[in-house]
């Protein structure tokens, strides 16, 4: 399991969207420091290139440098946004395999986390972002408690959500933001779905697009071997037209499209919401959909 200790150095990188200044992440850096961690700022953290935190090569250079440095125990991403997938061809995967360490992030960083997992089996942590979690000036106590459980290496046992399809399964947890995870389909960076528990959520998408993206996942060649699904929160995902149906309609219909029944829960407390669980990806979990229990094993 992932664990961080006081005096550990942690890298700070901007592999997705840009930040305007270190003031954007100052409260989060103070928080990490308060736990005894030592943030190390990447060379390109404040770069800007269109909507991204620097050129593809420069953003990747910060990540490669942190993976190469054994004194760095984890990497924290500054922000979401867009563009993290563009970094994937510039990463040194042999280096990452030899020096694995988790990347903490949310939203667009899903593509980075899962792409690295596909190439190296290196775990990561979804559900915490330096800028996003302190944007209101207050860090949710709920999210903080879950994050610090990850820091301590605790195997979380979480009861949340509603049963959609009963049953239980064990597998490796992957996924997170549906739209950025779906973008990996058909690329060399899409993880093998066999035996996986999928964690899926999104924000700001029309409900019919949620259905379209789920269909694309369903049509992946190894989707029939998925072990289970956890649907989190789909925030501000309204219908475009009245007849489109709601996100809830899309999720309720989804099991009918599967070749076999697998355990599925909805409304899990995770996503682009203030109070969310922070969850290691690439780690083995057990999902019991009958009592909506997720536990790391």
Image: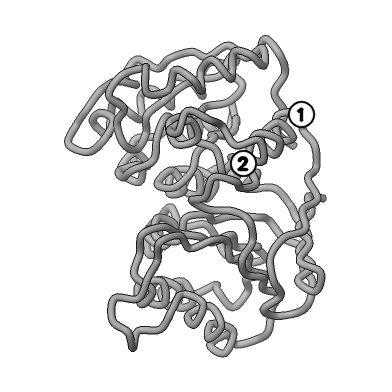
Crowd around label 1: few <14 · some 14–19 · many ≥20 (10 Å): some
Q: Residue, x 59% and y 53% (percent of image)?
A: 270
Q: Residue visible at 63% across and 39% down? A: 143
The answer to which of marks 2 and 1 sits earlier in the sequence is 2
In this image, 222 relative to 151: left or right? left
Please give left or right for residue 7 compared with residue 117 in the image: right
Could you tell me how far apart the alpha carbons at marks 2 and 1 are, in whole angstroms?
A: 16 Å
* Residue that appears at 23% across and 31% down: 55
As drawn, the label of residue 42 is none
Colouring scheme applied when the structure was drawn: one colour
Q: Badge 2: few (under 14), some or many (20 or more) residues near its Cα, within 10 Å?
A: many
Q: Is residue 137 above or below residue 10?
A: below
Residue 76 place in picture, x, y as percent: 50, 28
Residue 23 % position (x, y):
37, 17
Q: Secondary structure at mark 1?
A: loop
Where residue 36 sits: x, y (%)?
A: 66, 12
Residue drawn at x 76%, y 79% as measured from the top left:
166
Image disc number at residue 123: 2
């Amino acid at each position: 399991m992932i664990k961080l200790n006081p005096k550990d150095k942690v890298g700070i990188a901007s592999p997705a969207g840009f930040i305007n200044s270190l003031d954007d992440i100052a409260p989060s850096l103070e928080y990490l420091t308060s736990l005894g961690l030592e943030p190390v700022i990447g060379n390109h953290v404040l770069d800007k290139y269109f909507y991204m935190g620097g050129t593809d090569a420069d953003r990747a250079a910060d990540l490669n440098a942190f993976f190469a440095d054994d004194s760095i125990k984890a990497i924290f991403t500054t922000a979401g946004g867009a563009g993290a997938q563009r970094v994937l061809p510039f990463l040194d995967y042999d280096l990452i395999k030899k020096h694995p360490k988790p990347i903490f992030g949310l939203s667009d960083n899903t593509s980075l986390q899962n792409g690295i997992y596909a190439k190296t089996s290196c775990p990561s942590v979804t559900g915490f972002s330096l800028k996003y979690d302190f944007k209101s000036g207050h860090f949710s106590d709920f999210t903080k408690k879950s994050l610090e459980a990850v820091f301590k290496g605790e195997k979380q046992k979480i009861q949340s959500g509603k049963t959609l399809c009963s049953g239980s399964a064990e597998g490796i947890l992957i996924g997170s933001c549906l739209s950025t995870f779906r973008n990996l389909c058909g690329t060399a960076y899409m993880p093998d779905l066999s035996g996986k528990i999928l964690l899926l959520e999104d924000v700001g998408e029309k409900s019919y697009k949620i259905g379209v993206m789920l269909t694309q996942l369903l049509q992946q060649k190894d989707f029939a071997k998925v072990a289970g699904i956890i649907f989190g929160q789909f925030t501000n995902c309204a219908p475009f037209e009245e007849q489109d149906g709601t996100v809830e309609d899309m999720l309720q219909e989804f099991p009918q499209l599967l070749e076999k029944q697998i355990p599925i829960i909805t409304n899990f407390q995770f996503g682009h919401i203030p109070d969310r669980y922070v969850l290691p990806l690439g780690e083995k979990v057990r999902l019991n959909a009958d009592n909506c229990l997720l536990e790391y094993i």
